[in-house]
Image: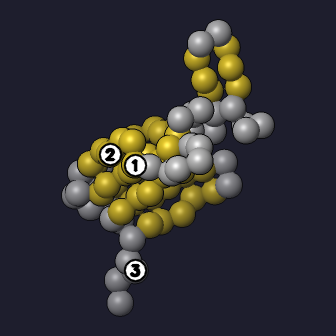
Amino acid sequence: MEEIYRAGNEVFGDFIIVKALEDGVTLIGLTRGKDTKFHHTEKLDKGEVMLVQFTAHTSAMKIRGKAEILTKHGLLTSGRDEE
């Protein structure tokens, strides 16, 4: 948990930016702790952008659909490549 910083009661951690490249992209937040569970879901339509932050409660995110994802490690695209 080195990437999480506390200032009072607020938690600040790494974040990612997700841009939907199609309608219906789903972002699912997964909990931290002994048992990983889904705790939050968002749907994005084509062109919508969401800034998502990892926190003391969110340890992972699942992104379903075609989207661009910008992280401190670079840019990647989720979803199936067109064949």
**Vertical arrangement, residue 63 with respect to residue 79, above or below:** above
Q: Position of residue 82 (x, y in %)?
A: 35, 83
Dot 1 crowding, Cα within 10 Å, few <14, some 14–19, many 20+: some
* Front: mark 1 or 3: 1
Asked whether disc 1 touches disc 3, contact meaning CB atoms under 8 Å apart, the reply is no
Asked whether disc 2 touches disc 3, contact meaning CB atoms under 8 Å apart, the reply is no
Q: Residue furthest right?
A: 2
Question: Residue at label 2?
Answer: 41
- Is residue 16 among the parts visible in the rendering? no
Q: Which residue is nearer to you in this view: 65 or 37?
A: 37
Asked whether disc 2 touches disc 1, contact meaning CB atoms under 8 Å apart, the reply is yes
Q: Answer with mark 2 or mark 3, whichever residue precedes in sequence.
A: 2
Q: Which mark is residue 38?
A: 1
Q: Residue furthest front?
A: 34
Q: Residue at x 26, y 61 (%)?
A: 22
Q: On the rendered image, what quadrant is the N terminus found in?
A: top right
**Vertical arrangement, residue 77 with respect to residue 24, above or below:** below
Question: Residue at label 3?
Answer: 81
Residue type at mark 2 is Thr
* Secondary structure type for disc 2: strand
